[in-house]
Amino acid sequence: MKTMVISDLDGTLLGSDRQLSDFTVDAINYIIQCGVSFTYATARSLNSATALTHRLALNFPVITYNGACIKHPETGEIIEIQCMDEAQIASVKESLQRFGVSPLVYTFLDGEEKVLWQRGSESEGMLHYLASRAEDGRMLPVDSFDDLFCGEIFYVTCIEDSCETLGRLNDELKCCDSLRSVLQQELYRPEFWLEIMDYRVSKAHALDDLKKLTGIDRIVSFGDSVNDMPLFEVSDECYAVANAVDALKVVADDVIESNDDDGVAKWLLENYKRLI
């Protein structure tokens, strides 16, 4: 039976400083060298994730955008992607306009991945995010709300400084069976993020596709947040780090040491022989 280890990044594999510790890098590269199949599943893009994981000798495709996309970690080749259709986009657009929220829109324009946002509509939280991506060639400002919705759209993110409006927007979107939305406070900062995608998108759905692609039979997973719940539900073993939300700890097989204490890496070093 083939086993794959899959870990969330932020709050799980990454420390509170948003970095992989040297201990974690060395531990994961060691178990990979010993024959363990290892990958990650994250809400981040591949660009953002690779900046933090480039020292890992990854040997399997990675899950990005909460499961909307599976990519090759070295080449960036898209293996699977779930885009939204016209009806879904129309529903999202209508709801955003009703609540006065201007989002980041992740799309493919002429085959190139771009992140669109409307100039002059940015919240403080979005301005901080954009400043952190100043060198990212995907970022593309547009002049109007309508200009946001072009190309092959696969992910929409709203960043606001309070959860009041996003909470009401999230409630409305959850009434749309064709969409999935996830509302969370940003892990490292005070603002709130609402992420919107096709209803089929989840880390669990992407993992099912990945299992079919790789022939993997068994899954051991690690996480810290509510967006890891679907991943835990389809895993054979699942472990929450000590800093995880209570809801995830309840469904986990066990709670291990925190992200700042290299909990995932320590567990893997202790158990890797039975995962080969």
Image (cartoon, rainbow, N blue to C red):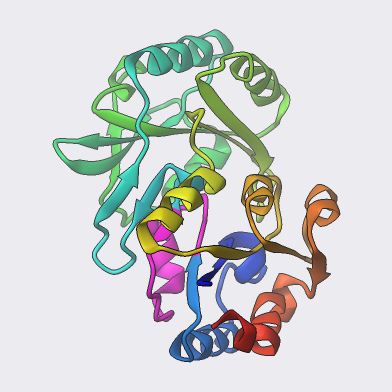
Q: Nearer the viewer, residue 253 or 145?
A: 253
Q: Position of residue 76 (x, y in %)?
A: 27, 59
Q: Residue placed farthest to the front in the image?
A: 1
> Residue at image x 46%, y 70%?
52
- Magenta extent: 40-63
Task: Name the residue located 35 percent from the left edge and 32 percent from the top edge.
Answer: 83
Q: Residue at x 57, y 41 (%)?
A: 125
Q: Is residue 131 above or below residue 17?
A: above
Viewer-proximal residue among 260 and 58: 58
The answer to whether residue 46 is magenta is: yes
Closer to the camera in the image, 197 or 139: 197
- Left or right side of 64 for 254: right
Q: Nearer the viewer, residue 259 or 4?
A: 4
Quarter holding residue 184: top right
x, y percent for residue 57 = 39, 81
Question: Residue 94, relative to residue 31: is it above or below?
Answer: above
Residue 163 position by quadrant: top right
Left or right of 270, for residue 110: left
Q: Position of residue 143 (x, y in %)?
A: 29, 23
267 left or right, relative to 153: right
Q: Work out whether 52 lies above or below 194.
A: below
Tell me, yes or no, if residue 242 can be seen here.
Answer: no
